[in-house]
Amino acid sequence: MKRTLLGLGLVLAALLQLGAQTATTPEAQRVLEHVRYLASPELAGRAPGTEGNKLAADYIEKQFKAAGLLPANQGQFQQAFTLTTGVKLGAQNSVMFDVLVERPGVPLDQTRPTKIGWKMGADYQPYGFSESRTVKGAMVFCGFGLSAPDKNYDDYAGIDVKDKIVIVLRGIPKWAEKEEGFKALASLRAKATTARDKGAAAIVFVNEKGDSADVLSPFGLDRMGKNSGIVALQVRRTPCARIFPPKDMPMFQAETAIEKDKRPHSYALTNTTGSITTSLEYTESTTHNVLGMVRGTERPDEYVVVGAHFDHLGMGDENSLHTSREPIIHPGADDNASGTAGVMELARRFAAAPGKRTIVFMCFSGEEKGLLGSKHFTNNSPIALANIVTMVNMDMIGRLKDNKLNVQGVGTSPGWPALLERAKGDLPFVMTTTADGFGPSDHSSFTAKNIPVLFFFTNLHSDYHRPTDTYDKINYDGEAMVLTMVERTVREIADAADRPVFTMPVQTAQKSASTGFRVTFGVIPDYGDDPQGLRITGVKAGGPAEKAGLKGDDIVTKFGATTIKNIYDLTSAMGEHKPGDKINVVVLRDGKELVLPVTLEGK
């Protein structure tokens, strides 16, 4: 029986391997070997700052050297930069309340307060976006923490929360769940921003009544910025209910009243004050871009960049779509070992047959953390950006199905549509194109510097950002065909007599599946933390931001009445406006504050 099972296992493994390879050419087989290593358990998901990520960078450098590439970073192949890769709780975290309970015949000023403490990790936990400091103040229950006067609902109406600690319920009332405008205000970060701008010193989130009322969410780094500007923590419902004085309306009753009456029931807790200390420590790690080049035969000082990111989610970070939050390897075979393997294969081809312009092959780290590697390169480029004629990006090119290929950035140069048709030639692609040069991958960093881009992509799938994105699911023959088209595209750009002309596509309507925004602003956010506000990398042509005079590298500090510290503040503020609203946007430019009037437009 043991031998029979072993034999069956070997047969199944062989069938899996056969299905995995779909690699009937030497080119496809080379791509398979690259993807299999990059997506292997040894590299553990290639998260920036980890040993697996460094092994990947070293592997790419080794392949570049073997192909005969020259180093493109001042004599080196790797370009180091730092990024925030983790957060942990510091030593000083505490929550304590003083509750004065009135007793018959005893003056209140002679009553000793009842002290109630919450135990960190058991009763409560700070959020990864909380400020680290100590705050003290009176306590206020503010319902669901929503402020939507245009919808005749405001949990903050008629109640003073300045310098106070507010308690709010997570989520939104049941009767508001079909209202897109409420959904846009329901996120933790949106509620934190609202409380902060109302003057609150801290915000305490408590779960709604139900099966998960006493469950704390996992603690971790927030991708959208660690600087929220307010102390923020979550608490289990049971210990939270204990601090409500006997004379006050119980939290359960207030929540029930909001659901029944469809109006706020906010109130200050009687004779109750709190003291909260939060301490968070952030981990800064070093990671590397990998840069190699093949010198051009006629125009060596003009450059075509061919790029892809090689980092992924490691054991599962805040971007994971896995149903469990338990650590598990996210291999990232398609996202983006496939694109990285494509860069290495194209590097081999161009090393054997150089173009007239220099081709620079770039593999970026930190893309999953907000395009950080490509942004670091474009802001610290060892190559004059003015001499980069085009950037060609590949991200998730390994799941070609029904020959459907999407190419984005086609509006960044007028010659792109015709060039792509020539490159497609006899290839059986069903090709769709997108004009916009901005998008959720590294080509955006180059568009922001007015460099023409093209982005090749074979579409999303159900394994995206999940542990199931494994090497055996890649269509290697399909990817080899995509690389043939990319090679033809890059060769024509490299060999053309004239460099491509950059154009910024006019802004078109943007899809937003979850926010329900009615307006568009037209800025490209930089997801890296900036203590002054939200830095932007560029603006969309024809959008409200461009019309108002905003520019790349501006730091947005205020959007109407809302102070802006991160992307969540901006999205929260946008959710409160409608098309045609005229607001003032405050930006810092070269250290000087500018007030720019903006007219928001519909989507």
Image (cartoon, helix red, strand yellow):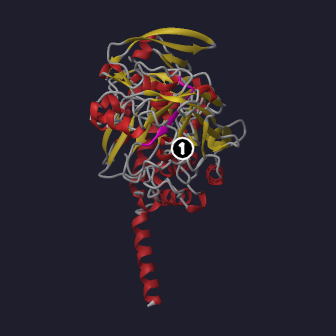
At label 1, the amino acid type is His
How many labels were placed on the picture?
Answer: 1
- Measured as percent of width and height from the top left, residue 376 is found at 61, 33
The magenta-colored residue range is 200-207
Q: Quadrant of the C terminus?
A: top left
Q: Residues within 10 Å of mark 1 (few under 14, many from 20)?
A: many
Quarter of the figure with residue 557 = top right
Does residue 478 lie above or below 297 as drawn? below
Q: Position of residue 295 (x, y in %)?
A: 62, 38
Q: Quadrant of residue 299?
A: top right
Considering every residue shown, the one lying at the far front of the view is 105
Looking at the rendering, in which quadrant would you find the N terminus?
bottom left
Q: Is residue 290 visible?
A: no
Residue 302: give x, y in percent of width and height. Answer: 58, 29
In the image, is 476 to the left or to the right of 348? left
On whether residue 298 falls in the magenta region, the answer is no
- Label the magenta part by its dominant secondary structure: strand
**Residue at image mark 1:** 309
Between residue 365 and residue 397, name the one nearer to us: 365
Q: Pick whichever, 246 or 30, lies toward us.
A: 246
Residue in view at x 44 percent, y 11 percent: 548
- Examine the rendering and report whether any part of residue 385 can be seen: yes
